[in-house]
Amino acid sequence: MTDQQNTAANEEAAPQFSLQRIYVRDLSFEAPKSPAIFRQQWEPSVGLDLNTRQKALEEDFHEVVLTLSVTVKNGEEVAFIAEVQQAGIFLIKNLDAASMSHTLGAFCPNILFPYAREALDSLVTRGSFPALMLAPVNFDALYAQELQRMQQEGGATVQ
């Protein structure tokens, strides 16, 4: 009987992670120079801005939002601007502060990125432009860089 109680207590205290839902929170596309841009020689330059944010929901649920914003220029003219906010709801329990921070700041965005990349490519091709085919992103390295930057700015820790 005591073994069953100990097992139940250990299972309750064990770290838990579960993906509850993945969804598009916001989607935007603008091609200010169309249709004239389609008649020009295509020599694009791509600018990518990537951002993540987290919000605690009720109990042990967390929303993580990955934003990918792309500005593509053909020469000096903006060919298109596309943005996707890919979000997920995650159940995360029994993690220490450092592990929770890493999970929300790197692990969850890693899960969301392929969905955001696909949504962005679909959006761009619907605008009659070639798919972007964004390279994978190392969110662990970005997270480590952000931790280092924050420590250098004043010894603050990410939570």
Image (cartoon, rainbow, N blue to C red):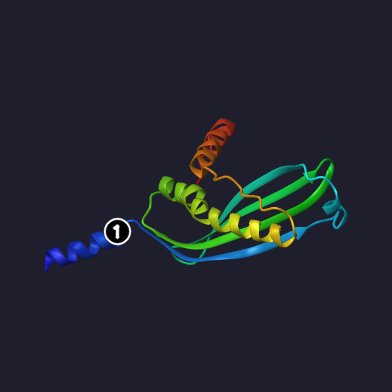
| Residue 147, x across and y down, in percent | 52, 38
Asked whether, in this view, residue 105 is left or right of residue 14, the answer is right
Residue at the spot 51% in from the left edge and 48% down from the top edge: 105
Residue at the outermost bottom position? 1
Residue at the outermost right position? 36
Residue 139 versus residue 114 in the image, above or below: above
| Residue 106, x across and y down, in percent | 49, 47
Q: Quadrant of the N terminus?
A: bottom left
Toward the viewer: 155 or 75?
75
Asked whether, in this view, residue 7 is left or right of residue 94, the answer is left
Residue at the spot 63% in from the left edge and 47% down from the top edge: 50
Residue 16 versus residue 69 in the image, above or below: below
Toward the viewer: 52 or 8?
52
Residue at the outermost left position? 1
Q: Which residue is mark 1?
A: 13
Toward the viewer: 38 or 56?
38
Q: How many marks?
A: 1
| Residue 24, x across and y down, in percent | 61, 64
Packing grade of label 1 (10 A; few <14, some 14-19, many >=20) is few
Q: Amino acid at mark 1?
A: Ala
| Residue 107, x across and y down, in percent | 46, 50
